[in-house]
Every structure is written in C-alpha cells, then in structure tokens.
Amino acid sequence: MTILTHLKKSLPSLSKAEFRIAEAILIDPEAAVNITTARLARLAEVSDPMISRFCHTLGCSSFPDFKVQLAKSLASNTFFISEAVSPGDDASLYIEKRINANQAALEYLRGKLQPEVIEQAVQLLSQSKRIEIFGMGGSAAIAHDAQHKLFRLGIPTVAYEDHLMQRMSAAAANEGTTVLLFSFTGRTQSMIEVARIAKESKASLIAITSPNSPLAAVADVTITSGDELEDTTLYVPMTTRIIILTIIDILVTGMALAQGPEIDVRLKRIKHSLDATKVN
Amino acid sequence: MTILTHLKKSLPSLSKAEFRIAEAILIDPEAAVNITTARLARLAEVSDPMISRFCHTLGCSSFPDFKVQLAKSLASNTFFISEAVSPGDDASLYIEKRINANQAALEYLRGKLQPEVIEQAVQLLSQSKRIEIFGMGGSAAIAHDAQHKLFRLGIPTVAYEDHLMQRMSAAAANEGTTVLLFSFTGRTQSMIEVARIAKESKASLIAITSPNSPLAAVADVTITSGDELEDTTLYVPMTTRIIILTIIDILVTGMALAQGPEIDVRLKRIKHSLDATKVN
DNA sequence: CCCAGTATTTAATTAAATTACAAATAGGAA
DNA sequence: TTCCTATTTGTAATTTAATTAAATACTGGG
C-alpha cells in the first residue's frame, strides 16, 4: 500500500496535532514533497518536532523518508494521464502520448472488469463443444485474432465476419455451442439479429460490447468493450482495440489455467509445427 | 521526461566527478533515494559539494529535490512489474497479472521505439500511392487490422494473408508502393521471399519484426515487434500483440497528423457511413 | 480537584546541505 | 614546452534542516 492511502486510512487514529499535519499535507500533496519540517509545522500550526513524530507514527524513518515515499505514491497516481495528440506534435511526443493513452486504457479496464463475469465467461467457453466467433467491420480482425488464440486450446473454433455465414452458423448452433460476439457499440442491427438466432438455437452467448446496449440485453454474459473510453478526437480509436485484445488475453489465460498442465504439451506442439517454415 | 532517463541521457555531457556520482546512483537507484550527500560523496569518491553541484547540473533545486524526483521516476518504473500467471490463480489475480503484463509491454515499447524510425516509416507510408500489407499465421489478423486503420486515411490499402497473393502483389508493386510486413520472428521463409520480390519491384519495405532477423536485413525500415519480450511461459504471447497494435496506432497517428485537418472530414464521413446499420 | 498518562512545545543538539573561497587540472595560444 | 585562462574539484565555514531531550500543557478517570 502506498503512503498516501496509508495516510488517508490512518486519519481516524491520529492525534489532534498529527491530524492537522495530515490535513495540511492532503490539501496539496504535490507541494508537500518539497516542504521543510519548519514550513509544514507552520502550515499545520504545530511545532517542528511534531512533524518528525508524525512521520514515525506512519512508519517512516524520518521526514525526508516520508517525503520520498509521498513522492513515490504521487508518481504512481499521476502516471496514467493520457493526452490527445495535436497538430504539430513531433514523433517522440505523439509516441509518448499514444503509449500513455493505451496504458491508461488498460488502467481503466482494471477498474471495470468484474472477476465474476470473467469467471463465468471462462467457464462457458471451457465447457463448449464449439466456439463460433462473430465480428464485423473493425471487429472482424479481432474476431480472427480471438479465433487464432482459442483454437490452440483444443476447442473447435471458427470466426466469421460475413453476416450470411454468421446467420447460418448461428442457426446451426446448439446447446454445446458458445457464440462470442465482438461489437463495439452493440447497436449494429445485423449483429443483434445474429445474436437472437443463436439464442433461439440454445447456444450460449458472450458479448464483448457496450453494456446497456441492445446486444448486451440478449447476451448471457457481457464484457465491456470500453466504449465509454472512445476518444473524442477522431484520430484513432485504437485504445479500445487494446482493451478488447486484453480481454481476449485474459479469457484465454483463464481457459489455459482451467485446463491444467496438459495444455503445455499442445501449445508446444503447435509452436513446433512451424519450425520447418523458418530459416536459420 | 523522468529524472532517471534524463540522468542516463546526460551521462556523456557530465564532468569526471559528476559522472562518478551518476554511476554511483545508477548502481542502486533505490538506495540513492535515502542516502545523504556525505555518504553518496564517499561512494562516488568525490567531495560533498560536488553532490549539490551535480543536482544543479541536472536541473534540480537541491539534493533533497533530486531524491524526490528520483523517487518519482522509480515509482513509475516499478509500477510495471509483470508476473507470470500460475496454476491456482483466481480470476481477479490473473486479470491483474495480465493487465500488468500488457502495461509493462507498453513501457518496454516506450524505451525501445526510436522516433526517427517512426518518422521515416510515417513519411514512407504518407508518400505511398499504394500500401500492401502482408501477415501470415498469427500476424494475419494484425495485417487486416492495420489495413482497416490505414484505408481510412485515403491511401489505397490491401492486406493479404495468402502467400500466393502476397507474391503476386509483391511482383506487381512499383516505386509508389509501400509494403508493410508483419512477421514476429522475421525468419519465416516465405515472408522473406516475398520481401525480396517486393524489393526487386522497387517497392519500399517496412517490416514490423525482430531486428537482426533476415527479414529486417531486407527491409528499408524495421520496427521492433518486441520479440525479446516473448513470454517464457507458453500460455499467451499476447503482450507482443499489444505492442504491434500500439505501433500501428502510432504510425496511423503520425500519418493523420501529417495530413492535417482535412483528415477529420474524411474520418467523420467514414464513421457516419455506418449510421444506417445501427438501431436506436 | 488532583493525579497519572499522554500529547505537545520549547530549547538544545545533531545532522545535512550549501556557499565561499582556494587549489588543481585541462585546454589553448605563444 | 610554457604560460595563461577557464573549468573543475576540494576544503573549510556557514547555513539550513531535522531530531532529541527535557519541560510543560493537556485529558480523562478517580
């Protein structure tokens, strides 16, 4: 736990003077990292030595040590600020900005993903006899990517980006089938239709889409596609792509873990099946 | 830029004594945040005042200030420790681990990407009459994803995952063509052949692949695919996918910025072309 | 209202960092 | 090479910061 959260948590157990010190720090933690005992004491209207004691109470060895730890906690908080690119940015700048944006997107996902939902999805997928993956437009590549990851786990898996193929596949599904749908908005008419057909076929439905969308309403399990995060700038809505890939990553990880160690052999064999196509 | 990277970058411009101080800090930066001038001076075998001077050289107002900034940079670095999943991990744990791993991958990319190389690639792509994207196996989905992003910028763009199509496309290429190759290892025989054919056709070649691979040797511009990062665990080599997507993100961002504001209109029109397919 | 215990302050001390100045070293011109 | 200048580094002194120790002021229980 970082010193800042520690400080906030121990607020109730602090003495009067210590509490005043804590308050003074919390008003502007950024400024506190460069303050001296004397100035902080004056701010909090306590005596200098109280500052030392306050630090010891929090488990720091000295006031400078406290400042260092405070600096650390501030750094980890402010790390995920993402800023939009703007005309005139040079390469090194927009590289930084885009990497930040993608890291921030993952941080967002960390807060949004519900472990129970993932567990449910992993269980559904693991128990499936077949997995059919549907994605159109920008989600088509994602669907194929997911297929590429999932078939390695030994469950028959197909990806369709063609709406007609999706309809036929959905119609041919049965209880043992899990349909995995990628739809960013969850409002694409044809995608919703396909979902309904699959449902009529008694297939299980996992949708990576916007919660509160019509598609989400049909699905058995909904995982957020991060649509609230969509850049307002028109440039590149790639951050959501990163989110969805990471969701796939997590699902596949969960499935691999559920299968146990025998999965390693299969993955090794798949990997080595490509050896003959490589030079050197 | 964080003080630690700043320190590393200014190493060459430091004086002899300052350099020794820098070395002493870099041996164990964690320890440096709690050291005193006197002890650090003894470690670096310089006099005490040199420490103060060293800090001013780096743009810090004092040695304590330097320590605080160092603490901040360390915090942002240690934030991205990625840990392998292991059997028995529950959902909330492997979710955390995978998100951390992907954030760490992006952090790795931040250190590895060279702005000049990106600039070069962006320029090549922007000047192209046509862009042909090739990817096989796990890179096929990436190729299609890149195609989906790039065609929006108004340059004729095609993606091929079929080796025969790639050969024909490469043979049909000319000076105005840029070929974008995705190959994780850079050692797939057929990929290298296609690259050579494209080169013979006088096309420009951008490879997102392993540096020091045979494929990289043929390419005009090589961007790392992050192959050094490949998980030793067999589970999911998805982190590299994230890296490659972010590279695409960055390239597209660069191209969009280069095109200027008129790009907005195009992107808006593409977006609204889908309106009729949505419900609500 | 007094006493014990805790919390807080004042004053003194110690530790840490910086400044001012002096010495040394390196680079360039005669 | 030799001398001069500019830069770098070290020594000693000083200032600033932080902590300790002792004294005082609270606070709640009898």
Image (tube, coloured by chain):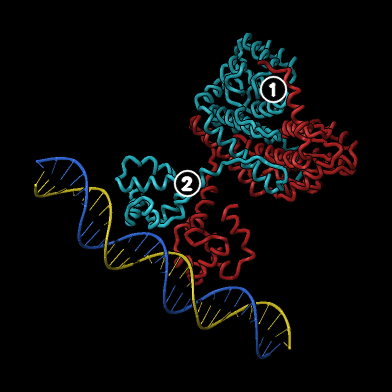
Chain colours: A cyan, B red, C yellow, D blue
What's under tag 1, amino acid-wise?
Answer: Gly
**Relative to B237, is A47 on the left or the right?**
left
Tag shown at residue B233:
none
Q: Residue at x 45, y 67 (%)?
A: B38
Query: Compared to A210, does C25 lie above or below?
Result: below
Q: What residue is pinned by disc 1?
A: A135
Question: Badge 1: how crowded within 10 Å, few (<14), some, or many (20+)?
Answer: many
Name the element at disc 2: helix
State the image coordinates of residue B180 (x, y, percent, origin top left). 79, 39
Which quadrant of the view contains residue B269? top right
Q: How many marks can you see? A: 2
Query: Compared to A278, does C12 lie above or below?
Result: below
Q: Residue at x 49, y 55 (%)?
A: B68
- Tag in front: 2 or 1: 2
**Residue at mark 2 shares a chain with residue at mark 1:** yes
Q: What residue is pinned by disc 2?
A: A73
User: Which chain contains the residue that carries disc 2?
Assistant: A
Q: Residue at x 47, y 46 (%)?
A: A73
Give whichever of B50, A152 is nearer the camera. B50
Give whichever of A125, A61 is nearer the camera. A61
Q: Inspect this view and state whether residue B189 appears.
A: no
Cα gap from disc 2 to disc 1, whole angstroms: 41 Å
Give whichever of B188, A243 is nearer the camera. A243
Q: Residue at x 68, y 14 (%)?
A: A194
What's under tag 2, amino acid-wise?
Answer: Ser
